Amino acid sequence: MDILDLARKSGMAVVLDAKIGRQEYRTVHGSVAALERFAELVAASMHDELVEQD
């Protein structure tokens, strides 16, 4: 599960704040509605992963 991709798909902005060596620091911004969509996408993604394991 790519958590940053899910954040983008939910309508949130993902901003690269800094890159130090190989480490990247990002900030995620969005509305409460986008946060709710993000939670729904995470739950659906987890459900799909569990179904694939069976």
Image (cartoon, grey):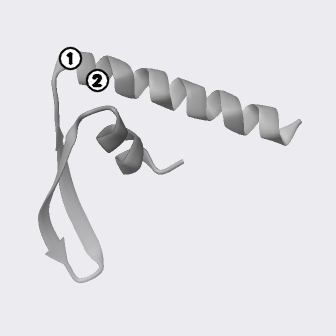
At x 62% / y 32%, what residue is drawn? Answer: 46
Q: Which residue is mark 1?
A: 32
Near-viewer residue (19 or 43): 43
Element marked by disc 2: helix
Q: Which residue is mark 2?
A: 35
Could you give the CA–CA distance between mark 1 and mark 2, rounded to whole angstroms?
5 Å
Residue 52 lies, with reference to residue 47, above or below; the image says below
Quarter occupied by residue 22 = bottom left
Side of 2 where 53 appears, left or right: right
Residue sitting at the far left: 17
Q: Residues within 10 Å of mark 1 (few under 14, many from 20)?
A: few
Question: Label 2 is placed on what type of residue?
Answer: Leu
Q: Position of residue 43 (x, y in %)?
A: 54, 25
Question: Label 1 is placed on what type of residue?
Answer: Val
At x 40% / y 41%, what residue is drawn? Answer: 6
Q: Position of residue 37 (x, y in %)?
A: 36, 22
At x 16% / y 22%, what residue is drawn? Answer: 31
